[in-house]
Image (cartoon, rainbow, N blue to C red):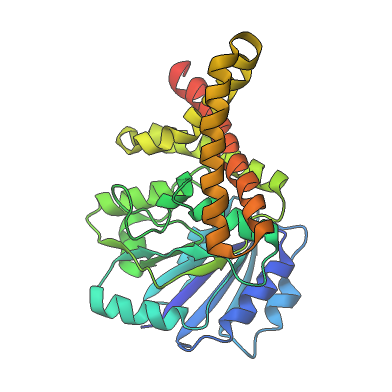
């Protein structure tokens, strides 16, 4: 099996350098790499070309269109039997492609997704953000877990699809705001088989500060409403949790001004919830600092997603 690895890139030359280095260390080397610069002002041409003797690699520069259409551009130039999409802020374990190849030969998936994890080199903030996005105590628990709710939807930071899927579906029709979930749903509806490959994890850096993380998760909350506008049945009860959390937090703050007994009850419930997150993160990361930061990351994740969800729910669903 020959893989085509598609990596959209926008103003992140250092990230692509780290990602490409991990690809040189793969135990299975039957693959090409396509790096598509999406109208960047800080291009990575020299960095990508420095890997010419180490990888079967090609570099493209195009006008800015967003990550969805940039991946389509990569698909049209790919030579592989199977396409793999990574975000530029990922590090790839050296046995990743070998594990994917072996799994696909055994299970014959038309498309797949894999989970993400925190690398030991990540900063405490990055480890905390990774925890928040994968914890069972936050909405991140449904992303890449073996026990997932409903149909599994691969996410584009770690996603693969066969050439046949690309040719029959035409690729992404959205370029932002939940484009990977929308595409996964259409792949399902086209009759293709999608699955999770639990062993095919990547180390996903995500954001390096809570401010950046807030902006990203606010965008994700809005994206969920965008998916709803295309596929109403895909809006599940779990997707309302961050909005309920955010409204509950606002209610508790209001109760402190008008009815203290109810406010104290709310304080107790939120305290128990965040203590569970703290000790679970401590158990996973063996670090008091990461555990404390994980509470902040979880709070940031839920409030940001909740505000984004509420904003577009009223704007696009209630008031249309």
Q: Residue 301: x, y in percent? A: 58, 42
Farthest residue to the left: give it.
191
**Pick the front one: 122 or 162:** 122
| In this picture, residue 245 sits left or right of residue 168 | right
Pick the front one: 251 or 312: 251
In this rendering, the answer to whether 44 lies above or below 314 is below
From the viewer's side, name the closer residue of 153 and 164: 153
Q: Residue furthest top?
A: 258
The relative height of residue 309 versus residue 24 in the rendered view (above or below) is above
Residue reaching furthest to the right: 42
- 80, 291: nearer the viewer: 291
Residue 116 seen by the camera: yes
Q: Residue at x 36, y 64 (%)?
A: 112
- The residue lying at 55 percent from left, 15 percent from top is 261
Q: Judge from the rendering whether residue 297 lies leftward or rightward of residue 171; answer left or right.
A: right
Q: Is residue 277 above or below residue 268?
A: below
């Amino acid at each position: 099996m020959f893989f085509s690895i598609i990596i959209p890139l926008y103003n992140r030359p250092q990230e692509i350098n780290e990602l490409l280095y991990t690809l040189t260390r793969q135990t299975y080397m039957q693959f090409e790499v396509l790096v598509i610069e999406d109208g960047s002002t800080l291009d990575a041409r020299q960095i990508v070309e420095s890997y010419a003797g180490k990888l079967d690699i090609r570099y493209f520069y195009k006008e800015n269109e967003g990550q969805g259409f940039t991946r389509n551009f990569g698909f049209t130039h790919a030579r592989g039997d199977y396409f793999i999409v990574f975000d530029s802020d990922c590090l790839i374990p050296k046995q990743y492609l070998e594990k994917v190849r072996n799994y696909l030969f055994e299970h014959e998936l038309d498309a797949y997704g894999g989970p993400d994890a925190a690398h030991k080199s990540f900063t405490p903030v990055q480890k905390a953000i990774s925890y928040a996005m994968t914890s069972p105590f936050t909405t991140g628990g449904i992303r890449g877990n073996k026990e997932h709710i409903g149909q599994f939807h691969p996410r584009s930071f770690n996603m693969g699809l066969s050439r046949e899927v690309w040719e029959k579906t035409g690729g992404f029709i959205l370029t932002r705001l939940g484009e990977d979930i929308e595409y996964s749903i259409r792949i399902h509806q086209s009759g293709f088989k999608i699955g999770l490959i639990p062993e095919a994890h990547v180390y996903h850096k995500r954001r390096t500060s809570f401010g950046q993380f807030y902006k990203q998760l606010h965008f994700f909350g809005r994206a969920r409403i965008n998916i709803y506008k295309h596929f109403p049945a895909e809006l599940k009860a779990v997707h309302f949790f961050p909005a309920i959390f955010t409204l509950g937090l606002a209610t508790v703050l209001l109760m402190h001004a008008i009815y203290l007994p109810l406010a104290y009850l709310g304080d107790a419930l939120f305290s128990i919830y965040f203590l569970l997150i703290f000790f679970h993160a401590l158990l996973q990361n063996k670090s008091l600092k990461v555990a404390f930061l994980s509470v902040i990351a979880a709070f940031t994740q839920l409030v940001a997603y909740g505000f984004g969800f509420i904003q577009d729910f009223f704007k696009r669903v209630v008031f249309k």
